[in-house]
Image (cartoon, rainbow, N blue to C red):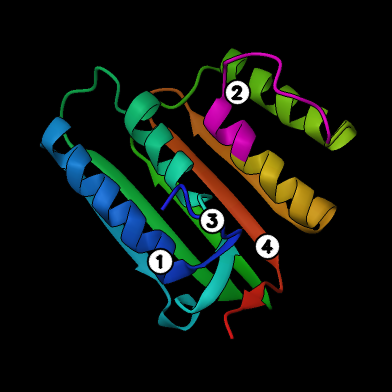
């Protein structure tokens, strides 16, 4: 999957990859629950490859680090008002205000200079996803992070029009 040179993938292909990844993670986190809320109409739509997986990986790596109890991830994808709306959320550790502001600052640097290289090793997954989306869509896309310490994180992405797999 990762070695293929394709830039685009059908939503259903990306979800199939995520399901395989999460199947492995269920051995690591026995109390992992994953919920999918994906409109059937969008399964054939194309998205940039490897956009969802890093966000789901962040849920596991950061959201559920040293967490006891049920760990929930919800992935939703829907077409609304001619936009493709994607959300990945967890009930994990969330982020401190300082970490949240640091991440927003890094994403703002991408807006100022999309050709820059990553300066630090922090926030690599979200940085890479945002960077790739920004290079493709620019200001036509919307990328929001909603996080509250000890309550979880939600990444919301709104892509314009989108491509339809032909």
* Residue 11 location (% of width, % of height): 47, 68
Cα separation, mark 4 vs mark 1, equals 18 Å
- Label 1 sits on a secondary structure element that is helix
Q: Residues within 10 Å of mark 2 (few under 14, many from 20)?
A: some
Mark whose residue sits in front, 3 or 4: 3
> On screen, 95 above or below 52?
above
Q: Which residue is mark 2?
A: 100
Quarter-wise, where is residue 166 in the image? bottom right
Residue 159: give its label.
4
Mark 3 or 4 closer to N-term? Answer: 3
Which stretch did the figure color magenta? 115-128
Q: Residues within 10 Å of mark 1 (few under 14, many from 20)?
A: some
Mark 2 or 3 closer to N-term? Answer: 3
> On screen, 140 above or below 132?
below
* Residue 71 location (% of width, % of height): 23, 37
Cα separation, mark 3 vs mark 4, equals 14 Å
């Amino acid at each position: 999957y990762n070695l293929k040179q394709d830039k685009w993938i059908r939503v259903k292909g990306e979800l199939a990859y995520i399901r395989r990844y999460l199947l492995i993670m269920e051995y690591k986190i026995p109390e992992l629950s994953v919920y999918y809320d994906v409109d059937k109409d969008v399964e054939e739509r194309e998205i940039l490859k490897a956009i969802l997986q890093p966000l789901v990986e962040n849920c596991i790596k950061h959201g559920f680090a040293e967490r006891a109890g049920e760990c929930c991830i919800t992935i939703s994808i829907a077409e609304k008002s001619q936009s493709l709306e994607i959300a990945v959320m967890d009930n994990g550790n969330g982020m401190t205000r300082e970490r949240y502001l640091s991440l927003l600052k890094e994403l703002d640097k991408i807006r100022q200079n999309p050709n820059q290289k990553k300066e630090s090793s922090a926030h690599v997954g979200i940085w890479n996803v945002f960077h790739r989306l920004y290079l493709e869509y620019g200001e036509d896309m919307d990328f929001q992070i909603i996080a509250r310490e000890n309550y979880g994180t939600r990444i919301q992405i709104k892509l314009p029009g989108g491509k339809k797999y032909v």
